[in-house]
Image (cartoon, rainbow, N blue to C red):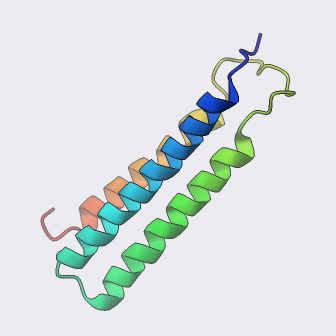
Amino acid sequence: MIPDIPNVIATVVIAGNIAIAIAVFLALSRGAARSGLTPDSQRRVRVGSAVFFGVWLATVFLFAPTSSSPPPPIPSPWWVPAFAVPVIGLGARAGTCSPAG
């Protein structure tokens, strides 16, 4: 049985996810600005993180269940853990490119 989630809660969760994505993007942008990277590298960090978070958010909305969709056959669909893979890859890439690492 799919629980009936009030629209207010869904709106707060969506707004919170968007706010977190924006906050992390701003932290990455400010970190790139203070890191001493060349302006071209700073721009690549900003564009890359903006594309990553935009695609991530679009994918979340694309795969979000609707209220009329049937319950999933298993509790955790295959794509739920798949969202962790790009984040781990981005963190590993940032660690290898960091002058401190």
- In the displayed structure image, the side of residue 86 where residue 70 appears, left or right: right
Name the residue: 33% across, 55% down.
Answer: 92
Position of the N terminus, as image quadrant, is top right
- Measured as percent of width and height from the top left, residue 48 is found at 46, 71
- The answer to whether 11 is drawn above or below residue 6 in the figure is below
Please state which of residues 70 and 16 is positioned toward the viewer in this rendering. Answer: 16
- Measured as percent of width and height from the top left, residue 47 is found at 47, 76
Name the residue: 66% across, 55% down.
Answer: 58
Please state which of residues 83 and 69 is positioned toward the viewer in this rendering. Answer: 69
Position of the C terminus, as image quadrant, is bottom left
Identify the residue at the far top of this view: 1
- Measured as percent of width and height from the top left, residue 31 is found at 24, 68
- In the displayed structure image, the side of residue 50 where residue 75 appears, left or right: right
Name the residue: 44% across, 58% down.
Answer: 22
- In the displayed structure image, the side of residue 99 where residue 8 appears, left or right: right
Q: How many labels does the image show?
A: 0
Identify the residue at the far left of this view: 100
Name the residue: 66% across, 17% down.
Answer: 75
- Measured as percent of width and height from the top left, residue 32 is found at 27, 74
Q: In which quarter of the image is residue 46?
A: bottom left
